Image: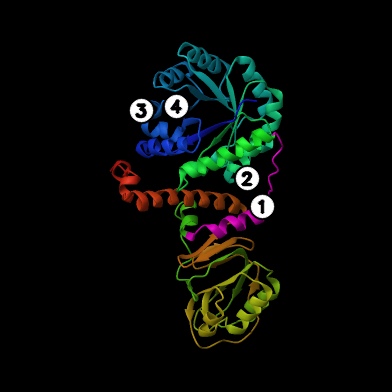
Amino acid sequence: MDKPILQVALDLLELRRAVEIAGEALSGGADWIEVGTPLIKSEGMNAIREIKKTYGVRTLADMKTIDTGNVEVEMAAKSGADIIMILALSDDSTILEAIRAARKYGAEIMADLINVPDPVKRAKELEELGVDYLNVHVGIDQQMVGKDPLDILSEVVENVSIPVAAAGGLDAEKAAGCIAMGASIVIVGSNIVKSRNVTESARKVRKEIDRAWREGRKVEIKRKSLEEEIRSILMTVSTPNISDAMHRARAMRDIYPIVRGKKIVGKAITVSTFDGDWAKTVEAIDVAGKGEVIVVKCSGDTAAVWGELATRSCMNKGIEGVIIDGAVRDVDDIRELGYPIFAKREVPNAGEPKGFGEINVKIVCGGVEVNPGDWIVADDNGVMVIPRERAYEIARRALEVKKHEERIRGEIEDKGRTLAEIVELYKWEKVQ
């Protein structure tokens, strides 16, 4: 196999930023630049023209063509694209028309296997039709729910003789794994273009794929359990990141940190109780396990259902933290202990352990529904609830939000730009 190709995907909206980032990626060792579908939809064929004119590098246009193969390939090729990406799901007639147009204008065709039910079968068919490259691609939304190009890559590579690319959430380690499995091209997007230091991130990927190519060995990728990965990601993102990932979802209302500067991440043990009745809240300590979060809904907030002694019990068991839609007391002691508790109100008086209420039932805490096993993330910005069935997806989406913000932060701090300049705010304001 020839030296592996690093293709960097510009899945951005702003052309000026895309051109700048492309240059940084090329400085880090990128070989090909992909003008991503979002950029093409935002800026049209001019995005392809500008990349080609500025750098003269081998340029791929991710058209995601599924119809009018001749027309779309022609306009991309005339704009400077050397390779045009079409969808493998397209009808064979569209594929053939795209290939004919590419040959006419001196371009090549890469077929994207995204969402193809039987990728190996379709890969063989596409090779016979005459495409130049195949792309084993797990899309962004698919990545968010845990799909990985590594799962099918080797089988595709073994069944075709044309070069195969791999794409879908690749970092340096996974990119190296793809090369070790026989991929000729790795396509890396957000892990390079959303980095604060694009050149260094590209250089890291370049180094790892070259090493995998030279050593010709299988790269073992250590995979965490789903729960470990969810927790690991959620520890790195903020509640604002999570809110953005959940389409501006709101935090619990009127729930505040007793101890500032603390973060809670864990699965919920829920408690429903009455104002001042602290029996079930204390019993929940025995139910909860290490790393879990006790979430309490009280019927009122005139008497405390939590205090210092309960806090010490939680610390002994390794419980991650406590969220109380109600009252807490002994806050001076709790602050001295530094234990993360979020509550609605601070009072000096406790109630009585009457034993009413339930543990591990659906509750509404701070105006947000919480079910047993939902993920809770709390920091000084507030308390967010992530439904357990969407936890991995939301964690991954929040991580993408964080990456995007880190890149913008770098442009503000290092290049002296304003936020409005970077995101081209006035261009994108909603038309009235």
Q: Name the residue under label 1.
A: 226
* Marked residue nearer the N-terminal end (2 or 4): 4
Q: Give the range drawn in magenta.
A: 216-239
Name the foreground residue: 389 vs 155. Answer: 155
Q: Which mark is residue 146?
A: 2
Image location of residue 278, percent across then percent down:
61, 81
The kind of residue tagged 3 is: Asn
- Residue 409 visible in the displayed image: yes
Residue type at mark 1 is Leu
What residue is disc 3 on? 46
Up/down of 87 relative to 273, above or below: above
Residue occupied by mark 4: 57
Q: What residue type is labelled 2?
A: Gly
Q: How far apart are marks 2 and 1 (CA)?
A: 9 Å
Task: Kindly tell me whether residue 295 is visible in this rendering.
Answer: no
Choose the circle earlier in sequence order: 2 or 1.
Answer: 2
Residue 299, position in %: x, y?
53, 76
The answer to which of marks 2 and 3 sits earlier in the sequence is: 3
